Image (tube, rainbow, N blue to C red):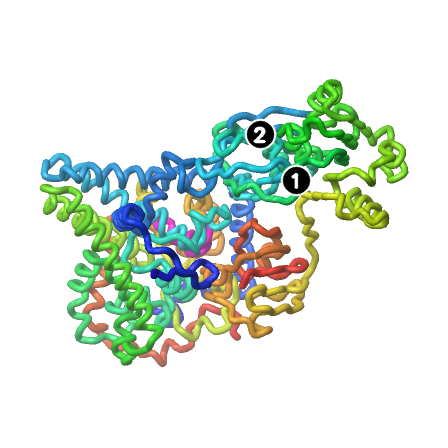
Amino acid sequence: MTVLQRKPVNPIAHLTAEDIEVIGKELDAIRDRVMADLGERDARYIRRLIRTQRSLELGSRAVLLFSLFPPAWIVGTAGLSIAKILENMEIGHNILHGQWDWMRDPKIHSTTWEWDHVSPAEQWKHSHNELHHRYTNVIGKDNDLGYGIMRVDEDQRWHPLHLGQPLWNLINACFFEYGIAAYDLELGRNLKKGRHRDPAFRARARAVGRKIRRQVLKDYVLHPLLSGPSFLSTLAATFTANLVRNLWSHSVIMCGHFPEGVETFEKTSIEGETRGEWYLRQMLGSANISGSRLLHIMSGNLSHQIEHHLFPDLPSNRYREVVPEVRALFDRYGLKYTTGSLPRQVFSAWKKVIRFSLPNRRPRDRANNRSAPALRTSGA
Amino acid sequence: MPVCRDDRGMTTTAQPPSAPASLRRGLLRLAAAVTTPLLPDDYLDLVAPLRSGADLRGRIVEVRPETPDAATIVIQPGRDWQGHRPGQYVRLGVDVDGVRQWRSYSVTSAPAGRHGPITITVKAIPDGLVSNHLVRHAQPGTIVQLDQAQGDFVLPATPPARVLLVTAGSGITPVMGMLRSGALAGVDVTLVHSAPTAADVIFGAALRDLAAAGALRLVERHTKDDGQLSLVDLAALVPDHLERETWACGPAGLLDVLTAHWDAAGHRERLHTEQFRPTIISPGEGGTVTFGRSGVTVAADGSTPLLEAGEGAGVLMPSGCRMGICYGCVLPLRQGAVRDLRNGSLTTAVPGDGVLVQTCVSAAAGPCDLDH
């Protein structure tokens, strides 16, 4: 992958500036129509999901009180893993996006929700909603491209540390929630620039510290203690559930922007970007995962990453419904709708992590490609 | 002595807790540590939404039609309900089409202490989102949000000897609560009630029964035939009206006329009024935007986002993506109307609604009062 602006064949060269604005208008119309249709059925969906998740978590933790018995360990760990996945993905991620704010229920609202995750909701909302969703796939602006620790694009500069990135990625996958907390804090950059004394950074770091303490106390001290003689086996069970949740969410999230076929963009290409151009960047910068209804729910509907990036505040249960219209729009304008099965997309993303751990085969002759059209085709 | 801060940031001192209280608090802290990031309440709400200690809620027990467009809703309030005084109203939060809507309704049942059910009586008004939902679609078993009863439209502890009640339409509802309470037993009561026709009189049969039993003198005014009640009519119907302690409830027009009349006669203190039609928000293009807590008011046109209007006036505004996707800029709209600049959709709010709006893509559609 290389930034779209430097590709020998620019996948949007055939679009006029007018086309791009029409695409934007059509997507606006899809969003408006679904927003106007939101109602009772959607409210029932999220409330039922929350109820199911809480019952599952409570039930699994109750079973784990007797985790010394292997069947209880297996059932409880499986249940808790699923509960944690649902909580982070289909419930937490989407509520924190403001997808359910329209219900005006203070208990299910982006401004009041806190999730089962070591990164405090407030910090995650900033780095994810405000930065990643705004600057999607813009090199140097969107830290989700390699999470600041990996090189996943030809146009990111190679460093010898990148040689170890397949290993870093595996470790990051296992402890993904801590990776996200460090990412939301911009830990690496802040430490490198000597900002560790900056009061604002320290306040945020303390907030993360508090959240980590609370999470660890719950999962690795209190619940094991409640289990009495099953202390160690419950500890192992919650650790396993967190590990399963981390590996799963890492895999799903890697599939959102890393697989083959996803485009990246130059920093300068988004100067003065119009709404149509922003939409187009989301269309080309995301990839879906195909699969069953269950896969969609377990992935927090991030399997509909394209639809999610087009309409980040649309309730997730509606993404599946708008797929046909969105796909038709891609087809009509000759754009590539990137999608594939979970194993295929995970493989594709990992291949990229491994390939870009090595430097580019030959230095790119940048000057030659300067004339390739930018995202904005208006010639401005 | 422990010092705690209440939500207004004021410092208050508290008594040292007793041993059982501190044990209780310790256990609650432990329970919260076990359920973090949720609270034990979040789990308990699943099974016991009306328990003591929960946010105040109620369960609809029964829906009884009163007239073709009015119904009485029987609600069992949660355990923390503190009861009501006759004439008071409750704020009710109902989910209509998935959206939480708050409205105020007079309690029409006699006080039944802290445990008994209460009733409200709702008249479906044209285009009334909540009233139509309650009258036509409310289902027994539904959980609704409640506030404690409030309002000053109540009888004094010792009722006066002579009472006049002037009501129109659903203005009968707080008065019905008073009549049912028994507080007016033995009092000389005259009720002048206006409704379009006899069939439209909410509680018509009950009122006529009370009148037949001699509990009150009932004057029904059927405005479709008789026309609107005027001061001349009132003087003819109740010659001593200015000497009576009077409670009046109905539309603003009626109340304004009565208030001016009692005022002119020098007996304003004998007239108690209540208008509970919701504040009418009439959306327009642009308007004055008030940032309540910052103490800033600024005029904004219909195309300027509230975020920019606030920043332009020097208000420290929370902000994020500035394109409506990140929800980093939402603020509570206390009262007023805003228009979504992306699709023109309107959002209106009256105090207590708790509506949060995205300031980066919303413009004033009339006067707006933001809680910031």
Specify the principal SS of the magenta part. Answer: helix
Question: Which residue, given by chain and number where applicable, does mark 1 sit on?
Answer: B156
Q: Is residue B36 left or right of residue B298?
A: left
Range drawn in magenta = A300-314
Horizontal and vertical percent position of residue B102: 57, 44
Name the kind of residue labelled 1 in the image. Pro
Is residue A162 among what the camera can see? yes
Q: Label 1: chain?
A: B
Horizontal and vertical percent position of residue B158: 66, 37
Judging depth in this view, the residue of B5 and A131 nearest the camera is B5
At 69% across and 60% down in the image, what residue appears? B285
At 17% across and 43% down in the image, what residue appears? A226
Magenta-drawn stretch contains A249: no
At 29% across and 78% down in the image, what residue appears? A197
Among the two numbered marks 1 and 2 on one chain, the one whose residue lies closer to the N terminus: 2
Check the picture and name the quadrant holding the N terminus of chain B.
bottom left
